[in-house]
Amino acid sequence: MALLERLRDLLGPSGFVADGEDRAPFERDWTGVYRGEALAVAMPSAVDELRAVVRLAAEAGIAIVPQGGNTGMCAGAVPRERSLLLSTKRLDAIRSVDPRDWSVTAEAGVVLADLQAAAQSVDRFFPLRLGSEGSATIGGLVSTNAGGTRAVRYGVMRDLVLGLEVVLPDGRLWNGLSRLRKDVTGYDLRHLFIGAEGTLGIVTAATLRLYPAEPAIASAFCGVPSVASAMEFLDIARQKSCDAIVTFEIMSKPCIDLAAAHVDGVRRPLAGEHRWHVLVEIAAHDGAARLESCLVGAMERGVVADAVIAQSLADAAGFWRIREGVVEAQPRLGLSIKHDVSVPLDAVAAFCERAEAEMRRRLPASIPLFLGHCGDGNIHANLAQARTPADIFTASTARLTAAIHDIAEALGGSISAEHGIGFKKRDEFLARTDPVEFDLMSRIKRALDPADKMNPGVLMPPMQQREAAE
Ligand SMILES: Cc1cc2nc3c(=O)[nH]c(=O)nc-3n(C[C@H](O)[C@H](O)[C@H](O)COP(=O)(O)OP(=O)(O)OC[C@H]3O[C@@H](n4cnc5c(N)ncnc54)[C@H](O)[C@@H]3O)c2cc1C
């Protein structure tokens, strides 16, 4: 095919992969559940090269699927219908780190951990933190509007982006790499591309906010009787710490049991048994005193039953080992049904109670594993297969997910707090979205990508399907 030859000429052997075996790692998501077939993989190493790839693909009428670290949870970076997979792996320069401006400008393929290290090297802090930070890229994090474990203090990716550079579906470059904190000249276009999951263009670089290096972190692992107690603890902790909480993660008891049974090095921090646990962290020079005051206040009110404060970095790392170990160990219980729900803070307890009851009613031999960033109202309400036969578990997935999402929706929540829609949740998203809102999104998509060649089928149905429905 002429396109492939032209791409090979443009990108050279290190930037172009056509062979089936070499393409394979790009063609499946990290869970191995979603797979596709790409015409080829293009890996441009400069923005001009990337623009040329987009122009060539547009001329040939070939769709593009952008891919960063391929750690996404919703199959948004898996190629479909022989599209061209565009990997940003080689677009990995940190263009500038500006401590006096408290900003950093990095290309799309920069891995989050590398960006964090670059900030640290000038005594600054980039606050996005998540389990995939060793692989997830700036372009992917912008395009999914990622959240993570520090969003309760610093917000999500959208809150951290000052400016963007984007290659549009026709190959033009929008240079929106502003470093301004305040600018009210016209529509704020960066927000269109944040969370767009590669459907409106390819993010090639971002300018991001930096923060002061965090002072000592005080961490505690707490046993709480209920989710309602955890949320009351959050209120107390926010007030008493003067909003210095940087992490507020919840885990149900089966999560702790699972990590303790299957993850090397996990020890239970608390002696007794508790139905729920909270990992709370405060960043402040007097963090230990503030944390103690929060815990005393919460224990007096009876919302924290027991707590242990980390006495060393190793203790704190042990708390995180449990939190991260839950995700790692979940496959030990067989198949999983995962949900990434958010609800208003005052509805978190009701959501957990109703969602857990629904899971127990439908699949009593399976194990609900609830964990998440409950300081942001974001709960990963997961169900592990355990003793339910695989065919029954699999056959129940769609209906259970619909029921869990119904509960979230009834409480004013969202079916995707931080993982995006991708291909996986697309039809449900369409079914649940207000028609006016969907119409606006469709018009934006059509205006920017009239030929529907930028990640078609992700976030919204392909154009023909949308037009047929109109
Ligand atoms: C162990 C683990 C823990 C995780 N924890 C969290 C968490 O706490 N919070 C959270 O929010 N997520 C979490 N994730 C999910 C995932 O890491 C994020 O969604 C991340 O933002 C994806 O980045 P990526 O570079 O891997 O993107 P990819 O998976 O490659 O792509 C994701 C989407 O973005 C698009 N895209 C990628 N790059 C670009 C670009 N340059 N321009 C336009 N579109 C692009 C893709 O087409 C796709 O639609 C976790 C994942 C794992 C495996």
Image: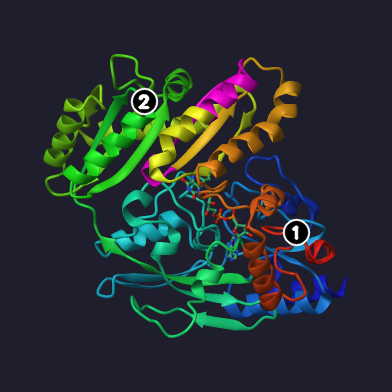
Image point 64% across, 64% down: which residue? 436
For numbered disc 2, what is the local secondary structure?
A: loop
In the image, what residue type sits under mark 1?
Answer: Pro
For the C terminus, the image quarter is: bottom right
Residue 66 vertical placement versus 278 (above, below): below
Tell me which corner region of the image, top left, top right, bottom left or bottom right, holds residue 345. top left
The three-letter amino acid code for the residue at tag 2 is Ser
In the foreground, 274 or 346:
346
Q: Secondary structure at mark 1?
A: loop
Q: Which mark is residue 226?
A: 2
Q: Give the magenta range.
A: 355-377
Q: Is residue 130 left or right of residue 219?
A: right
Outermost residue toward the right in this view = 1
Q: Which residue is mark 1?
A: 461
Q: Check mark 2 vs ligand 1: CB closer than 8 Å? yes or no.
A: no
Q: Is residue 138 left or right of residue 96?
A: right
Q: Residue at x 46, y 70 (%)?
A: 206
Taking the spot 36% from the left edge, 35% from the top edge, the residue there is 320
Residue 348 magenta-highlighted: no
